[in-house]
Amino acid sequence: MAISAVTALVGAGTAAVAGTLGTFTLLGSAFLGTFAINFALGVALNALSPKPKNNSGANGGYTVNSRGSALDHQIIYGKSKVGGAIVYDEATGTNNKFLHRIIAVAGHEVESFDRLYINESYIDFGDIDPDGNIPSVVNPDGSVSTRFNDKVRVQFAYGTSAQAANTDLVAESSHWTPSHKLSGIAYMYVRLKFDADTFPNGVPTFTAEVKGKKVYNPSTGLTAWSDNPALCLRDYLTAPYGLEEASANIDDDLVIAAAAVCDQTDTIATTTRYTCNGAFTTAVTPFNFLSEVLSSMGGSLWYAQGKWRMKPSYWTSSVMSLDEDDFRSSINVSTRHSRRDNFNTCLLYTSDAADE
């Protein structure tokens, strides 16, 4: 089907170009044919290439708290600051004093929540008390504020398959029950206590720095968190939201070699050579995702002999030296072309009067 589409576009493009340039007969038919085919192929490839989406729920994941009836799951590789999808709101208490909100941040198990942001102010995970209360936050200017103390409670679920429903929400809600586990979904449960002075602009935005998905490492046989681009790429190739390839169809020898290169620390900057840290949603096309992950290690991915193979960019020592003795023939330099070689075909027309 793709070949037929390209053929049709090439034919249409050739006709269009020929119709436009048909009067320039001195340019020659060979030049016109080449130009027409190249132009049409460009049109065809542009039409067939996938177009990246620009909304916040596509390539870049959720950067704020998004609301919708059918939002895409977010996937986090490495560590990234992300928002999430609002999946539940409920008001309870006298005069609806409390707002309960659940924000799903990932459609898989995550390693940890490291820092919570309330608008632009933040608190590290270790400074949140065991009940989820926020004693103080660090403001963008570096000052410390206690304005959210006793006004905000935040609790986290890591998205395990065996996680239970949030007990505090079950106890305070009229609708949330022990059956509402959100298995396999990492989320933040936020309870806000109404206070016009604390929330003059309404409900704040909650985002978090999250260490994302645990990925399989074929060199160790273990599944653990990693920001190694080769391991993240392998995970996407086998994941249900990715290409869902069988592990037997992945060349793990090359994955192990690529991961080793990415983990190298003997670089000029004395940092890990390549890392992959970011989020995306399941709305992203495989082409866009693979291109972005490959760019993080300057690498390439190809399918050959029934297996997916990958390779990152890295310097290797030369294996051969070439000099003039290796030339197949002598070098010829042409400094100018004669005028008669500057065109391919010249068409001459004669009038009927001349024929008579």
Image (cartoon, rainbow, N blue to C red):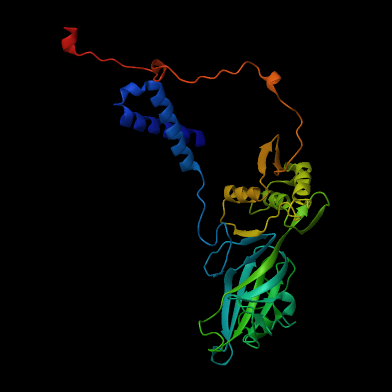
Residue 231: x and y in percent read 73, 51
User: Above or below — where is 81 with respect to 45?
Assistant: below
Residue farthest toward the front in the current orientation of the protein: 335
User: Above or below — where is 302 with respect to 130?
Assistant: above
- Residue drawn at (34%, 28%) of the image: 18
Front residue of this view, candidates 208 and 66: 208
User: Above or below — where is 1 with respect to 273?
Assistant: above
Location of the C terminus (image quadrant): top left
- Residue drawn at (51%, 55%) of the image: 53
User: Above or below — where is 330 with respect to 90?
Assistant: above
Q: Is residue 180 visible?
A: no
Residue farthest toward the bottom in the current orientation of the protein: 94
Q: Is residue 72 visible?
A: yes
Residue 349: x and y in percent read 25, 15
Front residue of this view, candidates 112 and 249: 112
Front residue of this view, candidates 117 and 336: 336
- Residue drawn at (76%, 49%) of the image: 259
User: In this rendering, would 284 be left or right of 146?
Assistant: left
Residue 322: x and y in percent read 71, 25
User: In this rendering, would 338 be left or right of 76?
Assistant: left
User: In this rendering, would 205 be left or right of 302?
Assistant: left
Residue farthest toward the right in the current orientation of the protein: 220
Residue 162: x and y in percent read 75, 68
User: In this rendering, would 206 be left or right of 40?
Assistant: right
Q: Quadrant of residue 305?
A: top right
Front residue of this view, candidates 199 and 319: 319
* Total numbered badges shown on the rendered structure: 0
Q: Quadrant of residue 177?
A: bottom right
